[in-house]
Image: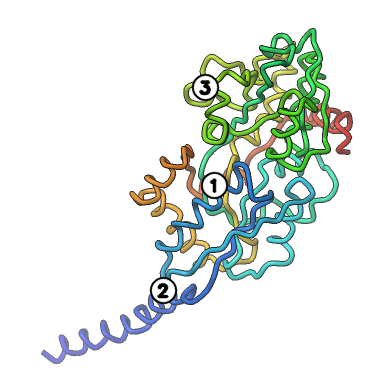
Amino acid sequence: MIVLRCFASFVVAALVPWAASVQARAQVFSGRTIAVVVPSGASGGYDSYARLLARHMGRHIPGKPGFVVQNMPGGAGVRAADYIFNVAGQDGTAIGMLEQALHLRQVLELPGLRGDVRKYNWIGRLVSNSAVLYAWHTAKVQRIEDAFTSELIVSASGTAPRLNWTALNMLADTKLRMITGYEGPAAAKIAMERGEVEATAQPWPVIRRENADWLRDKKINLLVQTGDHNQGLEHLPRMTDLAKSEENRKILEIFAAPAFIGRSIFTAPNVAADRVELLRNAFDQMLKDPEFIADANKANLDIEALPGRELQTYFATVSFAPPLVVRAREVAERAGLK
């Protein structure tokens, strides 16, 4: 009996600090507000997915913190990414949505980015983003094949569009003339209706949600996808399908890589591992939440999730053959980004 009492006392003594630790973790975000920093204005796919997450993720974090969306456009996503890396608190109360071309920007050694995408703590991906280039119905280019012989005036204000369309011009011989002065998709669509430009690109779920009437009334023609096939668009060509040679196709794969990143969530590099784990677990639990699923369906937002650990591995291991990167950098120079 004496042995049993001693053993019981030992168990209780061991459980006390464990229970205290669990309670402390449960309270780390209690009464706090987590900012979701978005690299765009209050429209388009980044903002839509960020607000969807902000409405639901807090329920799954111990302490149930509030969430607020903080729009921080500028520098084609660099401003928001650098804010998380260099300015925001390193306590998990600031998370960001990466501008999907920033990793490519780092691979191509483009100026401006002061952080290292590989050092962020990755929380998870909501959806990949194979954006779709589409043209107004009055444009001479009705199919992407028409762009081999006819010029198409395209709004391309961000890093990814400028790189993608320059790459197609150089590696597939398209005739895309880029206009870079419009701030975001909302302004580009207005310009397209006015006849100032003929085409722009957006994520397919956003096109279906925001411009269902354009699709229904055949006001726009879908031309090409920047990454893998979107569901329901298996007939539509991808950028890589247009390459004039196998080497050019491999270079275009470098520019298609941001589509894999899509709408991914990260936090600062020095956030404690246990807090990162809380955020990752909450993200994973949110994806199974019936309220989240219903809200995503109501907003017509596709979910193609990837856990944070898999994203962390991707950024730690992804690489491209050096000779192909050299040629990709030539594309960046032609795009005026070097």
In contact (CB < 8 Å): disc 2 and disc 3: no
What residue would you read off at disc 3? 216
Give the residue displayed 75% in from the left and 32% down from the top: 191
User: Closer to the camera: disc 2 or disc 3?
Assistant: 3
Give the residue displayed 76% in from the left and 15% down from the top: 172
Residue type, label 3 = Arg
What residue would you read off at disc 1? 49
Q: Is residue 194 left or right of residue 287?
A: right
* Element at label 1: helix
Report x, y in % for residue 246: 70, 14
Residue 174 occupies which quadrant of the picture?
A: top right
Give the residue displayed 58% in from the left and 44% down from the top: 263
From the viewer's side, name the closer residue of 103 and 191: 191
Q: Tell me which label, 2 or 3, sits earlier in the chain.
A: 2
Q: Tell me which label, 3 or 1, sits earlier in the chain.
A: 1
Residue 156 occupies which quadrant of the picture?
A: top right
Tell me the number on the disc at residue 212.
none
Residue type, label 2 = Ala
User: Closer to the camera: disc 3 or disc 1?
Assistant: 3
What residue would you read off at disc 2? 26
* Element at label 2: helix
Report x, y in % for residue 318: 64, 39
Q: Tell me which label, 2 or 1, sits earlier in the chain.
A: 2
Report x, y in % for residue 78: 76, 51
Q: CA distance from mark 2 to mark 3?
A: 49 Å
Give the residue displayed 41% in from the left and 47% down from the top: 295
